[in-house]
Image: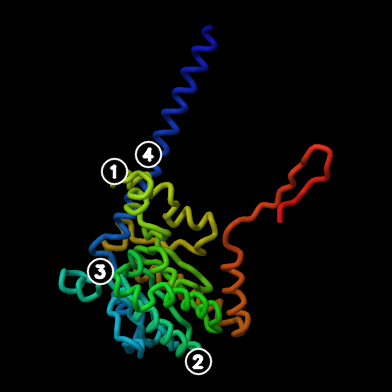
């Protein structure tokens, strides 16, 4: 009887410890989500200012218009000409409205593809900065082909024959992020997030409220260490001790080291090797298990 009571007490203790660990994980994921969205966090143009020279912006998709939420342009990086593609948010209300709060529209993705095709033609490496809550979900954006624009980017980016380095510097939200994130090497700052849906959206769908955003953030596996373990990203870029928002110069310096290292390695490959490496990288994502089902009186059957 005493052994049974001790065992039950131990079980209850382990359950409480498991719940505590789950809560810690949820809190950590949600805290990183909040850091990724910090108002003072450096955006694409902050890194352009610190890491590149002679930046010349490219505007318009030659079909509908320009999208300020997604910037593109040519620049010089450590003496080498490159193409920059990146999401851009705003600091104050006026800038945020102008940048559509970082939500790109179809013309933004078409502009990005136009710039990347130019880079491919003239053998310029492409450096992408990802920081968006997601693609803009308006009626107008859907009428102008939002899904088609993103899908086309996914296909065409997989065919590029120049190095593509992707840097997730804040929010990597769903297809809005992936539309410029098909890269040879994917870097992610330690307090950034990368997710198929926002924690708020997940909480609304599963719990029908906004009271479970921390649990949703933990369940989605959106932090850099989790994504590195899953093989979704390649490297975690450290940030200043208090986060990238606390020291833009140091954040840029830490990111610069990783970008240069990756770019130097990729430039040693041929154009075909660069394309094939990127293609195989994304083909390998995910896990497949082959199992045999033993049925009575018959041979093992492997599912197709």
Q: Position of residue 187 (x, y in %)?
A: 46, 67
- Distance of mark 2 from mark 4, alpha carbons? 50 Å
* Residue on which the image places disc 4: 23
Q: Report helix, strand or loop for mark 4.
A: helix
Q: Which one is earlier in the sequence, the residue at label 4 or at label 1?
A: 4
Q: Which one is earlier in the sequence, the residue at label 2 or at label 4?
A: 4
Which residue shows up at 49% across the image and 72% down it? 182
Q: Is residue 29 visible?
A: no
Q: Which one is earlier in the sequence, the residue at label 2 or at label 1?
A: 2
Which of the two marks, 2 or 3, is nearer to us in this view? Answer: 3
Q: Quadrant of residue 69?
A: bottom left
Which of the two marks, 4 or 1, is nearer to us in this view? Answer: 1
Q: Is residue 216 left or right of residue 40?
A: right
Q: Is residue 215 visible?
A: yes
Q: Is residue 240 left or right of residue 259?
A: left
* Residue on which the image places disc 2: 121
Q: Which one is earlier in the sequence, the residue at label 1 or at label 3?
A: 3
């Amino acid at each position: 009887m005493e052994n049974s009571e001790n065992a039950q007490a131990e079980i209850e203790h382990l359950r409480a410890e498991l719940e505590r660990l789950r809560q810690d994980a949820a809190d950590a994921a949600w805290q990183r989500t909040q850091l990724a969205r910090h108002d003072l966090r450096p955006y694409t143009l902050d890194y352009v200012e610190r890491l590149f020279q002679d930046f010349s912006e490219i505007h318009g998709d030659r079909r509908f218009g320009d999208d300020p939420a997604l910037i593109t342009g040519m620049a010089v990086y450590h003496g080498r000409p490159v193409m920059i593609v990146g999401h851009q948010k705003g600091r104050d209300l006026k800038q945020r409205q102008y940048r559509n709060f970082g939500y790109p529209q179809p013309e933004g993705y078409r502009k990005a593809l136009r710039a990347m095709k130019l880079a491919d033609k003239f053998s310029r490496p492409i450096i992408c900065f990802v920081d968006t809550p997601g693609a803009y979900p308006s009626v107008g954006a859907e009428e102008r082909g939002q899904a088609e624009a993103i899908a086309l980017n996914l296909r065409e980016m997989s065919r590029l024959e120049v190095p593509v380095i992707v840097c997730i510097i804040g929010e990597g939200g769903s297809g809005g992020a992936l539309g410029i994130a098909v890269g040879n090497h994917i870097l992610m700052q330690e307090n950034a997030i990368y997710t198929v849906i926002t924690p708020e959206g997940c909480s609304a769908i599963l719990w029908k409220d906004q009271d479970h955003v921390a649990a949703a953030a933990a369940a989605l596996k959106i932090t850099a260490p989790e994504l590195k373990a899953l093989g979704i990203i390649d490297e975690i870029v450290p940030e200043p001790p208090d986060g990238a928002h606390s020291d833009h110069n140091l954040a840029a310096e830490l990111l610069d080291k990783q970008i240069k290292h990756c770019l130097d390695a990729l430039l040693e490959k041929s154009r075909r090797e660069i394309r094939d490496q990127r293609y195989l990288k994304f083909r390998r994502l995910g896990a497949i298990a082959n199992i045999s089902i033993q049925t009575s009186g018959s041979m093992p059957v492997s599912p197709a």
